[in-house]
Image (tube, rainbow, N blue to C red):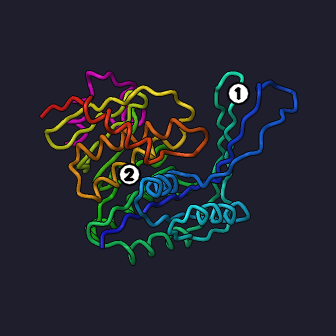
Amino acid sequence: MQKTITLTMNPVVDKDTHVAGIVPNKKLRCATPNYYAGGGGINVSRALKKLGGQSLCMYLAGGPPGTHLQQLVTEEHMAQKVIPIEGWTRENLSVTDTNTQLQYRFGVPGPKVKEEELQEVLTYLEETLATDDFMIVSGKLPQDVAPDFYVEISKITDRKNAKFILDTSGTALLPSMRSNIYLMKPNLGELSTIMGITSIAATELETLAKKFLKTFQCKILVVSLGAKGAFWAHKDSFEHIPAPTVLQKSTIGAGDSMVAGMVLYLTLGKPLSEAIKYGVACGTAATLHPGTQLCTKKDADRLFEWVKHHSVKKE
């Protein structure tokens, strides 16, 4: 039976709160915080669950924050595989100023991970992945992990004939391009880095996408354009998918919700174009909610009806 596995190498406990006015050198009395299990792959699994899908949520966790993270994942009723580590799981903070509706996001580095802990990740995937499974690798790597670690995972997906889906940034981005990728979702900044240029104009996307697909082992390129939607390329097909205009409350997890929507529809056997449109709807739906609440199926399905009628496809 086809499985979907998400991997989060550098997960986080996200703390979300709000306060009326952010000013320096003053004690700010914030609202009672909400806590969420976070990190790229975990957010994808959470969004899949909200959309009615299933996945195995695989992540590294250590210390008291790691125990809290496991509790949060359990409360969302997701199947999980925890790789225990000695280092402590990181904790991030997002604060919304209710006077301005501006959100401030504070992120910290993750723990160092030992070689034997990394090997446990690879061993488990070697034993678990099967033909046509979806292997979603999302998020940055922890400190001091070899930047080509995701390439090692792609070698396993190759051997198992599974589908490797990549959404990463930072030091892992360029080395990961040596992977055999089924679907990749960079944003414009990440695509610029990959292609070795400083910026990308909308009129250049099609030309760059053709070059990208010829240069790297990647079947499907989906470029996230934020509030402007997405652009995708596969072989000789190109399409710009605009996103509906909404009042954004938070952009945290929008990209992860987008990946979840795309993968859900692909596992259901939907056409590629339709899957990516649903992904754009899910990414937009995630911005309707504060903090790290991600998308809801009700919002995603409603926005999907708009997206389906506002795309421009070119063969």
Q: Residue furthest bottom?
A: 127
Q: Secondary structure at mark 2?
A: strand
Residue at 34% across, 54% down: 263
| Badge 1 or badge 2: first in the primary sequence | 1
Please state, as top left, top right, bottom left or bottom right, where the N terminus lies in the image: bottom left
Please, what is the three-letter code of the amino acid marked with disc 2? Leu
Please, what is the three-letter code of the amino acid marked with disc 1? Thr
Residue at 50% across, 69% down: 79
Q: Which residue is mark 1?
A: 98
Q: Which residue is mark 2?
A: 166
Please state if 241 lies on the left or on the right of 255 as rendered. Answer: left
Residue 77 shows in the view: yes
Q: Which residues are magenta?
A: 189-215
Residue 147 shows in the view: no
Task: Tell us which disc is closer to us: 1 or 2.
Answer: 1
Where is residue 23? Give x, y as percent. Answer: 80, 24
Where is residue 285? Give x, y as percent. Answer: 45, 39
Q: Magenta stretch: residue 88 in it? A: no
Where is residue 189? Give x, y as percent. Answer: 42, 32
Residue at 23% across, 47% down: 272
Q: Secondary structure at mark 1?
A: loop
Residue 228 against residue 149 in the figure, above or below = above
Q: Front-most of 235 and 217? A: 235
Please state, as top left, top right, bottom left or bottom right, where the C terminus lies in the image: top left
Q: Magenta stretch: residue 214 in it? A: yes
Circle 1 packing at 10 Å, graded few (<14), some (14-19), many (20+), is few
Main secondary structure found in the magenta portion: helix
